[in-house]
Image: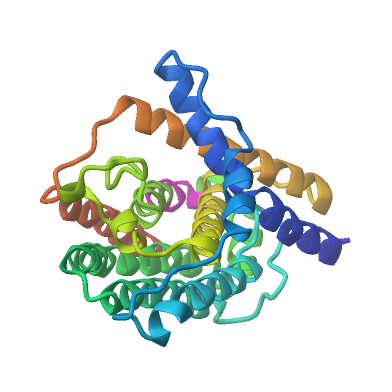
């Protein structure tokens, strides 16, 4: 039954991750008093892009074409490594924390390389911002998960999330709260959401992720957008596992709670984006430092 729940999680992630973007956009539309785009808008966009051809500049090389393929492959591996609440990952093993960090880093690395391969100074500017912010976000992520690992004595993400609240909520509540706050900031930064970045912006000087994929089109852009939705699912699942202490010991019920948690996080993101303004670029590193500090305090608390 546990293996079945893990397989269902992967299937649901692959099929429902674009719906998260629709939920976020619909919440933002409600706050703005608009009807908003359909919940399934990203599905329509992906279908349309998959039926279009791609145009490549003579400046680009094989790196530009390989970037979207490697990116989507990396995030598919990440989906198989991440548990959903108390449901273990499909490919769980000791040390999968490190592999998760590496595959997410590989996804970013190839996106940055593809942007630089265009020879555009504009895309190079976005790539530089992406690397700068990742320099602060990645250590915060590892520190946060490391604090959970110290608290549970396990080096597998599935083992960590499965036993995090086994001894009661009070035992790990301070660590879990600090790690959850840190992960929420990282989630917004890693997925280019407000207040770090605005995925719907057209103001060139403030773009980060969107500017790196301006030259992609057709199937390549479909892979990039789908990989971004899957990446959002990965970070929502990581956050839900810490913020949702429920464990029913029935895999399918735990899966249902985890799924509900993922979509609640999507709604929370929509609320955040509707009530906050985008930060100045100089303020973003400060916010990420706060995330790293929270994770470090969680590590120290777990080691006490």
- Residue sitting at x 35%, y 51%: 192
- Considering every residue shown, the one lying at the far bottom of the view is 62
Q: Can residue 161 be seen in this view?
A: yes
Give the x, y percent position of residue 294. 29, 54
Q: Does residue 29 appear left or right of residue 196 in this picture?
A: right
| Front in this rendered view, residue 221 or 145 | 221
> Would you place residue 236 above or below residue 37 in this image?
below
Q: Does residue 34 appear left or right of residue 206 in this picture?
A: right
Say if the magenta span includes residue 177.
yes
Q: Is the magenta stretch mostly helix, strand or loop?
A: helix
- Residue sitting at x 39%, y 78%: 64
- Considering every residue shown, the one lying at the far right of the view is 1
> Would you place residue 47 above or below residue 302 in this image?
above
- Considering every residue shown, the one lying at the far left of the view is 282
Q: Quadrant of residue 11?
A: bottom right
The N terminus - image quarter? bottom right
Q: Can residue 304 be seen in this view?
A: no
- Considering every residue shown, the one lying at the far top of the view is 33
| Front in this rendered view, residue 50 or 189 | 50
Give the x, y percent position of residue 124. 20, 69
Q: In which quarter of the image is residue 112?
A: bottom left
The C terminus - image quarter? bottom left
Q: Does residue 116 appear left or right of residue 228 in this picture?
A: left
Give the x, y percent position of residue 36. 50, 24
Give the x, y percent position of residue 255. 75, 49
Q: Give the magenta-colored segment's residue range.
A: 171-179
Q: Quadrant of residue 226?
A: bottom right
Say if the magenta span includes residue 60.
no
């Amino acid at each position: 039954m546990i293996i079945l729940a893990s397989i269902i999680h992967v299937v649901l992630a692959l099929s429902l991750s674009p719906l998260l973007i629709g939920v976020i956009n619909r919440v933002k539309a409600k706050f703005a008093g608009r009807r908003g785009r359909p919940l399934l808008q990203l599905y329509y966009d992906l279908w349309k892009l998959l039926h279009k051809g791609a145009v490549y500049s003579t400046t680009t090389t094989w790196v530009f074409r390989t970037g979207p393929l490697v990116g989507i492959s990396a995030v598919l591996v990440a989906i198989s490594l991440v548990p959903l609440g108390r449901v273990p990952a499909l490919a769980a093993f000791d040390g999968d924390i490190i592999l998760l960090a590496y595959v997410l880093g590989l996804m970013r690395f190839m996106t940055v390389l593809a942007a630089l391969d265009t020879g555009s100074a504009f895309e190079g500017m976005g790539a530089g911002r992406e690397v700068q912010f990742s320099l602060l976000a990645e250590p915060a992520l590892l520190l946060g998960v490391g604090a959970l690992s110290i608290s549970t004595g396990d080096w597998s993400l599935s083992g960590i999330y499965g036993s995090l609240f086994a001894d009661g909520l009070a035992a790990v509540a301070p660590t879990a709260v600090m790690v959850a706050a840190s992960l929420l900031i990282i989630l917004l930064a890693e997925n280019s959401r407000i207040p770090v970045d605005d995925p719907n912006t057209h103001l060139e000087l403030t773009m980060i992720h969107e500017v790196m994929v301006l030259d992609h089109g057709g199937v390549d852009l479909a892979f990039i957008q789908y990989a971004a939705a899957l990446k959002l699912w990965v970070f929502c699942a990581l956050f839900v596992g810490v913020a949702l202490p429920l464990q029913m010991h029935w895999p399918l019920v735990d899966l249902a709670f985890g799924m509900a948690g993922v979509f609640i996080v999507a709604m929370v993101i929509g609320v955040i984006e509707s009530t906050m303004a985008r930060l100045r670029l100089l303020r973003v590193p400060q916010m990420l430092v706060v995330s790293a500090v929270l994770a470090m305090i969680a590590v120290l608390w777990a080691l006490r």
